[in-house]
Image: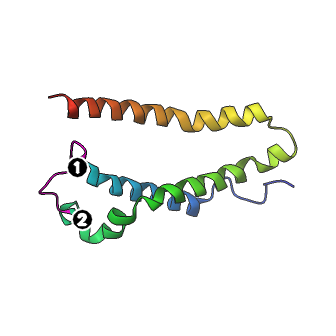
């Protein structure tokens, strides 16, 4: 069975995944209001940018993480199912591709988080 009847990209899924990522970004916005491990005393959730418009994303955006990974897993399966089934992609090749797609962004984000956190906690 081959994937040739499907388009190279599924734009609706890409847009949906982008929306999930945007929801996660908005949900994390509240973390700028932390003072150490607690919210600042004067933090008002409604004061976040465009809170009225994006209220649901600010409050439930963390669900976007699960949705993003679920959708990414589906897309990855859709892209590699046929090549795994006909054994043109080996187990090791599959994992090299998977890790090379995920971990560069993970390490850059981790590094940026460490730099920002260091600046926040240095007094």
Identify the mark at residue 38; answer none if there is no mark. 1
The answer to whether the residue labelled 2 contacts the one labelled 1, judged by CB atoms less than 8 Å apart, is no
**Residue 41 in magenta?**
yes
Determine the CA span between mark 2 and mark 1.
23 Å
Relative placement, left or right, of 35 versus 106 is: left
The spot of residue 53 in percent (x, y) is 29, 70
Which residue is nearer to you in this view: 4 or 57?
A: 57
Specify start and end residues of the magenta stretch as a single range: 35-44
Residue hosting label 2: 50
At 77% from the left edge and 50% from the top edge, which residue is drawn? 81
Please name whichever residue, 120 or 81, is drawn nearer the observer in this view of the structure.
Answer: 120
Quarter of the figure with residue 36: top left
Identify the colour scheme used: rainbow
Extreme residue toward the front, this view: 37
Residue at 22% across, 63% down: 45
Secondary element at tag 1: strand
- Closer to the chain start, of discs 2 and 1, is 1
């Amino acid at each position: 069975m081959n994937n040739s009847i499907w388009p190279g990209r599924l734009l609706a899924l890409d847009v949906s995944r982008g929306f999930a990522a945007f929801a996660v970004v908005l949900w994390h916005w509240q973390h700028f209001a932390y003072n150490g491990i607690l919210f600042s005393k004067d933090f008002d959730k409604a004061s976040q940018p465009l809170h009225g418009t994006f209220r649901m994303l600010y409050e439930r955006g963390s669900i976007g993480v699960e949705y993003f990974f679920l959708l990414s897993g589906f897309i990855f399966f859709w892209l590699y199912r046929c090549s795994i089934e006909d054994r043109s992609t080996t187990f090791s090749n599959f994992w090299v591709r998977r890790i090379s797609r995920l971990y560069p962004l993970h390490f850059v984000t981790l590094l940026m988080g460490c730099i920002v956190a260091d600046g926040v906690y240095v007094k």
